[in-house]
Image: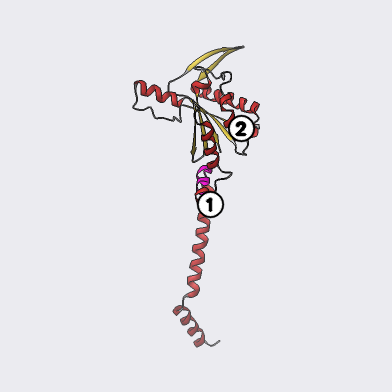
């Protein structure tokens, strides 16, 4: 190729920068792919939010947490001491501690969960996993209980965990597989009602709501 032809080719390339555009575009797309891959890797998909969105888009709630919440609310209608709600992380069944346990005790009252059997049968028919969460109120607890060969320290942390454990043992006897169950003790760190500025009867009512065992279906 003559020198003049080479110079003319360079001039035409500068006047029509199509190749440069596609190179820049490919670089941008590569960076976007990497960004979204990192974003997805760092994110956590909330099953409750996802299934709500799925139901709203498809119009079909069959086999979803949306359908399960609706069924459980229908079953729980009129039952005292239990409430059902759908959160971002799944379906919550909140049982008042006073209905299940004596004050400061982690031993289930005899027959206290029997009224919840229809609710639990409906959950048993699904493949969802369950977090059994123990919650206490904000009143500090520190107690030494005499046990065989020593003493056992009881705090809100241990009490919430032991109460959740008692419910898990009941659920296993009810027919739930151990692989579907997880115990979580939150003590007073996740109150249902903020007690910050409350006093008197309102404070006691809020504390009563905060003392609970929750079953999170997810």
Residue indicated by mark 2: 121
Q: Could you tell me which residue is drawn at 48 percent across and 17 percent down?
A: 142
Lateral position of residue 149 relative to residue 90, left or right: right
Which disc is residue 58 wearing?
Answer: 1
Residue 138 higher or lower than 16, as above or below:
above
Q: Could you tell me which residue is drawn at 45 percent across and 26 percent down?
A: 210
Viewer-side residue, 84 vs 167: 84
SS label for mark 1: helix
Residue 120 located within the stretch drawn in magenta:
no
**Measured from the top left, where is residue 114 in percent x and y?**
58, 24
Here the colouring is secondary structure
Lateral position of residue 60 relative to residue 176, left or right: left
Viewer-side residue, 15 vs 74: 74
The quadrant of the image that shows the C terminus is top right
Viewer-side residue, 79 vs 214: 79
**Measured from the top left, where is residue 104 in percent x and y?**
50, 17
For residue 86, say whether it is visible: yes
- Residue stretch in magenta: 45-54
Q: Could you tell me which residue is drawn at 39 percent across and 30 percent down?
A: 194
Q: Could you tell me which residue is drawn at 66 percent across and 30 percent down?
A: 175
Which of marks 2 and 1 precedes in the sequence? 1
Viewer-side residue, 120 vs 212: 120
């Amino acid at each position: 190729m003559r020198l003049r032809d080479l110079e003319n080719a360079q001039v035409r390339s500068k006047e029509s920068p199509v190749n440069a555009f596609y190179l820049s575009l490919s670089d941008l797309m590569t960076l976007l792919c990497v960004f979204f891959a990192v974003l997805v890797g760092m994110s956590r998909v909330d099953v409750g939010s996802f299934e709500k969105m799925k139901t709203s888009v498809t119009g079909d709630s069959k086999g979803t947490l949306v359908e399960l919440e609706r069924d459980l609310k229908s079953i729980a209608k009129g039952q005292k001491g239990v409430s059902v709600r759908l959160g971002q992380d799944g379906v919550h069944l909140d049982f008042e501690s006073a209905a299940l346990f004596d004050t400061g005790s982690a031993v289930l009252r005899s027959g206290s969960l029997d009224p919840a059997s229809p609710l639990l049968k409906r959950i048993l028919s699904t493949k969802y996993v369950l977090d059994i969460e123990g919650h206490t109120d904000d009143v500090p607890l520190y107690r030494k209980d005499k046990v065989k060969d020593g003493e056992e320290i009881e705090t809100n942390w241990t009490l919430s965990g032991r109460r959740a454990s008692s419910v898990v043992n009941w659920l296993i006897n009810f027919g739930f597989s151990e692989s579907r169950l997880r115990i979580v003790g939150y003590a007073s760190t996740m109150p249902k009602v903020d007690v910050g500025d409350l006093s008197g009867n309102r404070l006691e009512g809020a504390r009563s709501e905060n003392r609970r065992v929750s079953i999170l279906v997810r």
